[in-house]
């Protein structure tokens, strides 16, 4: 295998925010729309679908690749997170050489102070992922806010697999009066139904195939929720995972789609969503499905 010659890739690539900001100023007009897709790399078809939507809906598209240290509460997870910049650049260029790539260093983003800002997300941060990953959403809010300030996008695209994160980002934008339209995009799935994720690359072929059970159980839970309470569906899901070793259920929760608070007594006027996190060989896989 030969290394990719980045000098021969015709798309604009920036490793520092100052150069990116200057470049965007030089190509923007007062009526330009900028679409932005923030990623942590290890790109898959789900990421590329977000980029394609941005290309379709905006005159300028910016993609960032940055593994953000402040949103990892587990140092091992941070160290093992796949970093595949050359392969990622090749995938982006294969989609469109008109995409502008921003691949900063930790120093370029944090300027020597690798710390999270503290945010109040009106309680959204205390549910599900927030319970199991302390400080995670402060890290998410910090990096997304900084990236928005650098790129100044019109529209920003996020996958609905991380639905809690999507709601957190929308709340952060609202509370900070940022003029960004945050757009949630449909989950992109592998042929067996497993939600596409960069973490899937760490699964063995066997575990990747067997992980189809996550989406299968979510779909069955959706059917059961039509006639059963949230509590009964939750108990059924928990029991279903008692015999699925090495897949271990970390949490399953049915929640209000807007507030993310657990569903106690369902009503016909509320929108509900099921959230799940499953661990296999220390790899966390999350997924979600609308129940309405």
Image (cartoon, rainbow, N blue to C red):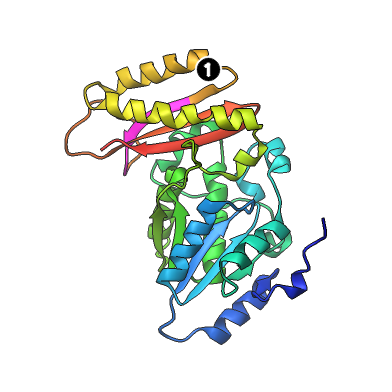
The span shown in magenta is: 251-258
Magenta segment includes 203: no
77 and 146: which is toward the camera: 77
Report the magenta stretch's main SS: strand
Q: Position of residue 146 (x, y in %)?
A: 56, 62
Left or right placement of residue 100 versus residue 119 in this view = right
Give the residue at x 73% y 42%: 79
Task: State whether residue 286 is above or below residue 114.
Answer: above
Residue 154 visible in the snapshot? no
Question: Which of the 4 quarters of the picture holds residue 290?
Answer: top left
Q: Name the image quarter holding the N terminus.
A: bottom right
Q: Is residue 208 left or right of residue 181?
A: right
Name the outermost residue toward the left.
268
Residue 258 to residue 210: above or below: below
Q: Does residue 6 appear anywhere in the picture?
A: yes
**Residue at screen point 22% across, 29% down:** 266
Viewer-nearest residue: 179 or 60:
60
Q: Is residue 171 above or below residue 193?
A: below
Residue 102: x and y in percent read 63, 67
Residue 27 pos. (x, y %): 54, 85
- The quarter of the rendered structure image containing the C terminus is top left
What residue appears at the point 70 percent right and 72 percent down from the top-left corner? 9
Q: Residue at x 68, y 63 (%)?
A: 104
- Residue 210 lies left or right of residue 162; in this view the side is right
User: Percent from the top left, x then y, of residue 70?
Assistant: 63, 48
| Element carrying mark 1 | loop
Q: Which residue is mark 1?
A: 244
What is the crowding at mark 1: few (fewer than 14 residues within 10 Å), some, or many (at least 20)?
Answer: few
């Amino acid at each position: 295998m030969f290394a990719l010659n980045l000098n021969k890739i015709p798309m604009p690539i920036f490793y520092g925010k100052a150069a990116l900001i200057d470049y965007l100023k030089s190509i923007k007009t007062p009526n330009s729309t900028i679409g932005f897709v923030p990623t942590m790399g290890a790109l898959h078809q789900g990421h590329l679908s977000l980029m394609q939507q941005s290309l379709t809906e905006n005159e300028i598209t910016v993609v960032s690749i940055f593994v953000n240290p402040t949103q990892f509460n587990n140092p091992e997870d941070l160290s093992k997170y796949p970093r595949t910049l050359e392969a990622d650049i090749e995938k982006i260029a294969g989609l469109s050489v008109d995409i502008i790539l921003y691949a900063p260093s930790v120093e370029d983003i944090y300027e020597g102070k690798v710390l999270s800002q503290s945010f109040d997300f009106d309680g959204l941060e205390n549910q599900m992922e927030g319970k199991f990953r302390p400080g995670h959403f402060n890290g998410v809010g910090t990096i997304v806010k900084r990236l928005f300030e650098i790129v100044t996008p019109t529209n920003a695209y996020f996958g609905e697999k991380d639905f809690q994160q999507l709601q957190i980002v929308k709340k952060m934008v609202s509370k900070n009066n940022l003029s960004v339209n945050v757009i949630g995009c449909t989950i992109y799935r592998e042929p067996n139904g497993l939600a596409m994720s960069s973490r899937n690359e760490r699964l063995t072929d066997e575990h990747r195939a067997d992980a189809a059970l996550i989406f299968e159980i979510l779909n069955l839970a959706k059917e059961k929720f039509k006639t059963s309470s949230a509590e009964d569906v939750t108990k059924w899901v928990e029991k279903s995972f008692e015999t699925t070793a090495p897949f271990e259920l970390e949490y399953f929760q049915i929640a209000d789609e807007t507030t993310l608070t657990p569903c106690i007594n369902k009503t016909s006027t509320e929108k509900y969503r099921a959230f799940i996190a499953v661990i296999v060989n220390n790899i966390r896989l999350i997924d979600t499905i609308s129940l309405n």
